[in-house]
Amino acid sequence: MTTAFTIGHLARATNTKVETVRYYERIGLLAAPGRTGGNYRAYSEDALSRLSFIRRARDLGFSLDQVRELLDLASQKQRDCGSVDVMALEHLAEIDRKLADLTALRRELGALISSCQGGTISQCRILEALAPR
């Protein structure tokens, strides 16, 4: 006998909103479940595992297209994992680029804040820097 989960249980077990579970079904990341006699969605253990995989990949910042590709690769058990390594390395490089951009942004905003001498709004260096030139 297989265990059937409601959408609410599946959502709670994976810390996912019910609307997100439905969205993943609509875009094909999660298979549409069977229905109970009362027409409720009935999810399997496989659906719970798949949704957990999707959530973890999303938590790591992978895009939905990347998640789709990772799910496809995960289903090919005998395949070399080099493609997964390449995807992960490319994603890590993108994270590093974003961190560098955020560091530069932080430095610039910090300099603006440091330039503030107090006073009135008409003398505000931060607002002056934001104004069109």
Image (cartoon, helix red, strand yellow):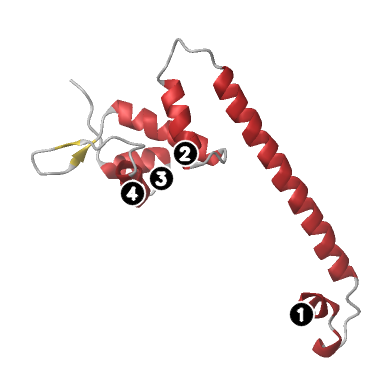
Q: Nearer the viewer, residue 125 or 68?
A: 68
Residue reaching furthest to the top: 78
| Label 1–label 4 contact, CB within 8 A | no
Chain-order first, disc 2 or disc 4: 4
Residue 29, quarter of the rendered image? top left
Q: Amino acid at mark 3?
A: Thr
Q: Residues within 10 Å of mark 1 (few under 14, many from 20)?
A: few
Image spot of residue 66 (x, y percent) = 50, 35
Q: Which mark is residue 65?
A: 2
In front: label 1 or label 4: 1
Q: Which mark is residue 18?
A: 4
Label 4: element kind: helix
Label 3: element kind: loop
Residue at mark 1: 131
Q: Is residue 91 left or right of residue 19?
A: right
Residue 106 sits above or below residue 46 on the image: below
Image spot of residue 130 (x, y percent) = 76, 75
Q: Amino acid at mark 1?
A: Ala
